[in-house]
Amino acid sequence: MEEKIKEIKIPSESKKINIEFNFEKDKYIIYSAVFYLCGLLIGSCLYKAVTSDALDNILKPKDVTLINLFLSNMCLYMTLFLIVVFLGLCLIGYPIMNIIPAFLGIEYGLKISYFFINYSTKGVGYSILMIAPFSAAFITIISYTLCISAEMSKNLMEMTKEGSNGNFDIKPYLKKYAVLGSIIIAVSFASAGVTILLFSIVTI
């Protein structure tokens, strides 16, 4: 028994978990969050400043079919996604693409303000159930797309420099874009489905 106890080794120091932060690598995610929050603020202030029946008619959930709402969501978010992809193919695209999350922020800022002001408690519930999770999903997808496009744009710029002998392979980027594009389609469908389910609640 004593021999077995001696064989047991007790580590003198516990293992430490190191969380490394690479600003150069993660800065586009930070930029996305900052621009998105600025967009939310702008959208909220904009709704209060220009409140009108015309704006409310645009933001008000409409009694449409699941397919129509799905196609509407997909067209909007795929457009923003493709803009980021296109900017990634430009030599100076990476500084411009950072403002794309601001457009998402403005959209959701307008929607949140509309529901808070017009539906009070129900509006808060709708925003938590519908707007918050899907806005987080879309901004996350756009953020990762920004990282990929920024990397590609920088690589293209490096290749144009005098004396550069590097080869550019677009296939890895296209594979990542395909995955993110598929996720946008799935989230757009889920968003449309939840909106249809909650339509009767917010219109009572």
Image (spheres, rainbow, N blue to C red):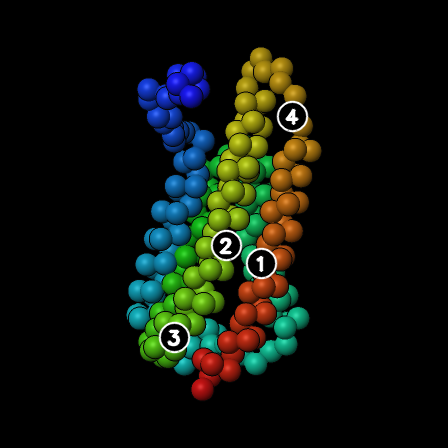
Tell me the crowding category of disc 4: few under 14, some 14 to 19, or many 20 or more residues within 10 angstroms, Cα based: few
Disc 3 versus disc 4: nearer the observer: 3
Q: Is residue 165 left or right of residue 25?
A: right
Residue 204, relative to residue 130: is it above or below?
Answer: below
The image quadrant where one finds the N terminus is: top left
Residue type pointed to by label 1: Val
Distance from Cα at disc 3 to Cα at disc 4: 49 Å
Secondary structure of residue under mark 3:
helix
Q: Which residue is mark 4?
A: 168
Residue type pointed to by label 4: Phe
Name the outermost residue toward the front. Answer: 1
Residue 79 spot, x, y in % from top left: 58, 55
Residue type pointed to by label 2: Ala
- Which of the marked residues, 3 or 1, is nearer the chain's N terminus? 3
Q: Which residue is mark 1?
A: 187
Distance from Cα at disc 4 to Cα at disc 1: 31 Å
Tell me the crowding category of disc 3: few under 14, some 14 to 19, or many 20 or more residues within 10 angstroms, Cα based: many
Residue 108 can be seen, yes or no: yes
Find residue 137 and name its label. 2
In terms of image quadrants, where is residue 129? bottom left
Which residue corresponds to the image point at 67% horizontal and 28% vertical from the top-left? 169
Disc 4 versus disc 2: nearer the observer: 2
Residue 37 spot, x, y in % from top left: 35, 53
Q: Is residue 185 left or right of residue 145?
A: right
Secondary structure of residue under mark 4:
loop
Secondary structure of residue under mark 2:
helix
- Which of the marked residues, 4 or 1, is nearer the chain's N terminus? 4
Q: Which residue is mark 3?
A: 123
- The one nearer the camera, 126 or 89, is 126
Secondary structure of residue under mark 1:
helix
